[in-house]
Image: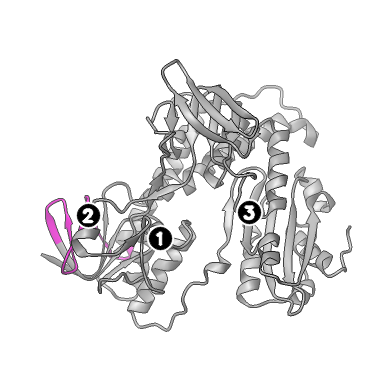
Amino acid sequence: MSKYDIIVLGSGPGGYVTAIRASQLGFKTAIVEKDNLGGVCLNWGCIPTKALLKSAQVFEYLKHAGDYGLTVKEYDKDFDAVIKRSRGVADGMSKGIDFLMKKNKIDVIKGYGKLKPGKKIDVDGTEYSADNIIIATGARSRELPSLPQDGKKVIGYREAMSLAEQPKKMIVVGSGAIGVEFAYFYNAMGTEVTIVEFLPNVVPVEDEDVSKQLERSFKKSGINIMTSAEVTKVDTSGDGVKATVKTSKGEEVLEADIILSAVGIKTNIENIGLEDVGIVVDRDKILVDKFYQTNIPGYFAIGDVTPGQALAHVASAEGILCVENLAGHQVEPLDYGNIPGCTYASPEIASVGLTEKQAREKGLDIKVGKFPFSASGKASASGAKDGFVKVIFDAKYGEWLGCHMIGAGVTDMIAEAVLGRKLETTGQEVLKTVHPHPTMSEAVMEAVAAAYGEVIHL
């Protein structure tokens, strides 16, 4: 039986990052993966979706070339080539992870891993043991009873990334990051898209001002949006699909070629041996302490299978903390109140910390500032004036409570707010930090200035 210091079960952005950091710290490390290295994120999620979205963005640039003083006489799209490019990007990234495993001397064990008592893992009949086992098996698309996925007419995100033909009409159920990104992609490529959202606002976890702006931008792009609406029945017996949607005004039947179910995720914790080992689970999540130890010594869990936010960068951070703690480093628990969230549609969305509503519900005395990109020189020059930056500060102490952005490139800007909050930066310190001109990032400084009554360009 092969013996390791650490075995990681799953090679997504939580698992492979954990394995690399463990190896750097001197642990003899192995990683178990039944499919391609990189997990859902690299193969079917984070990375290939961004390739699709970039193709859609370039196609939109071609459509609007005249807005930039350019004439493009002929252009078209090749849907199959767009999908192939996305798959090629994913394949390249997965091969990159394979290289990193070899570089860091990590043993890759291919096959289906199942936990065993005594800190062991069975991989397709072969047992391996370790001093510590880290579960990082991730999650998959969640299915609703009223919306069972058949992989053809009712699909999840995985099928949405590799359709053989572009649908003429698509219904997207759910308007979280996955639903919104695919709605943007398919609409930009020419599909007639309708979003059905159960809650009153699209992207419901975001600040309400962000939700309203995205709805305006999407409607301007031709996306149909139904909020406070629920798909209660689906009929796939015909050539396409019919969805019965319940709204406050009654029932409505929508027809489309395909329904994309984007109503959240389901953790991959079935049939991995949790019950055999006695690991405690609550509501689809493995319970862990602040350094990701389960109730059974020697067994840890990180990423989507635990109660924290189901985000790739959270999984990576959790895994690093987990193994650094095992190595005896002095580490602080992760601050889940300072995790950035990003949605990569057009316009992009990025946020961190409290929304304005959450801050007021806490009874805090706050200062709120907002700067629209319509007043930004860089945004005007770029032809990307939709959106804004909104900041929320504690009026008494100057603490940066939250930052919410919607617009072009904001997912690359949010780190300023995350770092500022980590360092306990005050509003006045942000104001006295010189921002480069002309940039989109100036809008952060301007929004802070608006909160303190010192805004220049409004």
**Residue 30 as seen in the image, left or right of residue 323:** left
Image vertical order of residue 389 relative to residue 449, above or below: above
Q: Residues within 10 Å of mark 1 (few under 14, many from 20)?
A: many
**Residue 373 as seen in the image, left or right of residue 228:** right
Residue 4: in magenta span: no
Of circles 2 and 3, the one toward us is 3
Residue type at mark 2 is Gly
Residue type at mark 3 is Glu
Does label 3 or label 1 sit earlier along the sequence?
Answer: 3
Q: Secondary structure at mark 2?
A: strand
The residue wearing badge 1 is 303
Residue 112: in magenta span: yes
Mark 1 and mark 2 in contact (Cβ < 8 Å)? no
Does label 2 or label 1 sit earlier along the sequence?
Answer: 2
Please report the residue visible at 69 percent of the width from the left and 76 percent of the height from the top. Answer: 425
Q: Which residues are magenta?
A: 103-127
Does label 2 or label 3 sit earlier along the sequence?
Answer: 2
Q: Secondary structure at mark 1?
A: helix
The residue wearing badge 3 is 206
**Residue 255 visible, this angle:** yes
Q: Secondary structure at mark 3?
A: loop
Q: If the image is split into quadrants, where does the C terminus sit?
A: bottom right
In percent of width and height, residue 12 lies at 38, 55
Please report the residue visible at 65 percent of the width from the left and 42 percent of the height from the top. Answer: 346
In percent of width and height, residue 268 lies at 33, 51
Please report the residue visible at 47 percent of the width from the left and 39 percent of the height from the top. Answer: 86
